[in-house]
């Protein structure tokens, strides 16, 4: 029995977790809210762009949508790291999110490389 979870499902569950974290951050004072907005936008956009890529009209369209998802995942990683370094959250509080974000980045990047390889044949 495989533990394979489709990237679209993983990205959706990641967005749910980001939404919950941002809801918590939004209840705090000041800068927390600003970071929550940035993190929410980027973290939920990953899955939305992966979903769009599933209806791509061509391999180039697929690569374009996946590339946007990759950029959003990297931005999400940035905001999570900033929360830790600015001591707004501890590393322990967001390490699972950060790890999943890293995994999403690797999976999306591999998908782009694989599809580009198909185009070159």
Image (cartoon, helix red, strand yellow):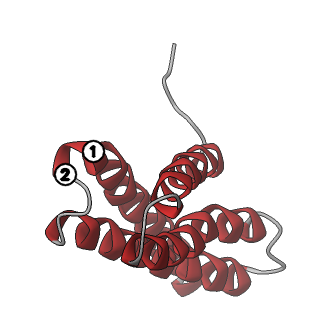
- Work out which quarter of the rendered image holds the C terminus and state it: bottom right
Q: Nearer the viewer, residue 102 or 77?
A: 77
Mark 2 crowd level (few <14, some 14–19, many ≥20, 10 Å Cα): few
- Relative to 99, does residue 76 appear above or below in the rendering? below
* Marks 2 & 1, CB-CB < 8 Å contact: yes
The Cα–Cα distance between marks 2 and 1, rounded to whole angstroms, is 5 Å
Q: Name the residue located 68 percent from the left edge and 77 percent from the top edge.
A: 62
Q: Residue farthest to the front?
A: 29
Q: Residue farthest to the top?
A: 1
Mark 1 crowd level (few <14, some 14–19, many ≥20, 10 Å Cα): few
Element at label 1: helix
Q: Quadrant of residue 119?
A: bottom right
Q: Nearer the viewer, residue 114 or 27?
A: 27
Pointer 2: what residue? 90
Pointer 1: what residue? 93
| Residue 59 pos. (x, y %) | 69, 79
């Amino acid at each position: 029995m495989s533990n394979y979870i489709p990237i679209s499902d993983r990205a959706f569950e990641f967005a749910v977790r980001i939404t919950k974290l941002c809801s918590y951050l939004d209840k705090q004072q000041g800068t927390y809210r600003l970071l929550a907005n940035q993190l929410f936008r980027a973290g939920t956009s990953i899955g939305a762009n992966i979903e769009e890529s599933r209806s791509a009209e061509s391999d180039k369209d697929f690569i374009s949508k996946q590339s946007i998802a990759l950029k959003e995942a990297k931005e999400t990683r940035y905001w999570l790291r900033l929360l830790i370094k600015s001591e707004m959250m501890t590393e322990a509080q967001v390490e699972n999110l950060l790890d999943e974000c890293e995994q999403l980045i690797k999976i999306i990047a591999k998908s782009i490389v694989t599809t580009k390889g198909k185009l070159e044949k």
